Image: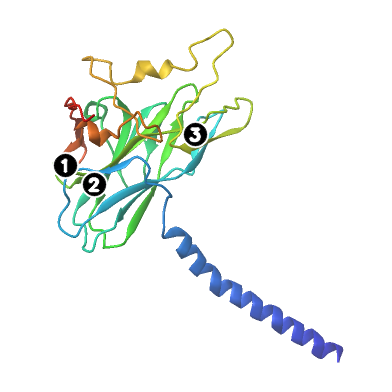
Amino acid sequence: MSSRRHVKIAGSLLTATISTVLILPFAAVADDAPGPGSGEGGKAMDKAPAGVELTTSLSEKITVDNSTKETNNLVAGVTNKGSKESGKANLLVVGFDGMVIKDVPGCSAITESKLPKGSNSGFTCAIDQLAAGKSKSYKVAATFDLAKTGKVCLPVTSSDGKKTFWQQGPVPFGTTSPSPNAPVTPLLLGTENKPAAPAGDKSGGTGDDKGGGKEGGGQETLPSTGPRDDVLPLGATGAALLAAGGAGLWWATRKPTATR
């Protein structure tokens, strides 16, 4: 009796183990499919081909190592919400102020001379074809200087760079409660970073102004997008990212007309 009972229990455990193995792969695929979480700060720009609707998304929460300044869990995604294949396009990942994009695997770095005005780093990712309803995600390696604000921008352009179908940002990541003594600091999408000012310093972390778009040529710093009502998305100012030859970029700086 005892041996039969052991055999029955062992059989039940084996069945449970097999069931778990069969279920796990499907869960992994399901978790991977949606990609990052938020399209906050995104805006449609130039008209895309008929049946194509390209949008982007970013992780809603990332962390930064307080000692190395390296970020974790930053993912950029592009989705075709249309009914037809996208055709060739480019996704760009561009850093501003305290956020520096170090690497996007599978994508090409934008040379310093070709970076958009006001940015400090960027990569361009070629999209050969994105089927209707499908998404593609990219893990982004970046650093974040907690003594500054930090922003990222995701434009989606045509393959020749002459049109910008969609643009998300520059949208900020940050924290309103910095913890310099903690090992890591969580950063939220759409949150302006509030650096902890050193003792006796009343500037409150405005050191990132030196790295804005006012350097060299006196051009205006590009506006951030986010939850504040008084800040318009970049697209509303008439500015757009253009690519020449894939990695060659410049940022148009047309003055917006009053819309009030």
Picture layout, residue 120 above or below residue 11: above
Spot the residue most to the front.
260
Circle on res. 161: 1
- Where is residue 160? Give x, y as percent: 14, 44
Report the coloring of the rendering.
rainbow
Dots 2, 1 in contact, CB < 8 A: yes
Spot the residue most to the right.
2
Residue name at image x 60 percent, y 25 percent: 180
Q: Nearer the viewer, residue 90 or 232?
A: 232
Residue name at image x 46 percent, y 33 percent: 191
Q: Which residue is mark 2?
A: 90
Q: Nearer the viewer, residue 34 or 237?
A: 237
Name which residue type carries label 3: Glu
CA separation in Å, label 3 and label 2:
26 Å
Mark 1 crowdedness (10 Å alpha carbons): few <14, some 14-19, many ≥20: many
CA separation in Å, label 3 and label 1:
30 Å
Dots 3, 2 in contact, CB < 8 A: no
Mark 3 crowdedness (10 Å alpha carbons): few <14, some 14-19, many ≥20: some
- Where is residue 203? Give x, y as percent: 48, 12
Residue name at image x 19 percent, y 60 percent: 51
- Position of residue 195 in the picture relative to residue 224 (left or right): right
- Where is residue 182? Give x, y as percent: 63, 30
Q: Earlier in the sequence, mark 3 or mark 2?
A: 3
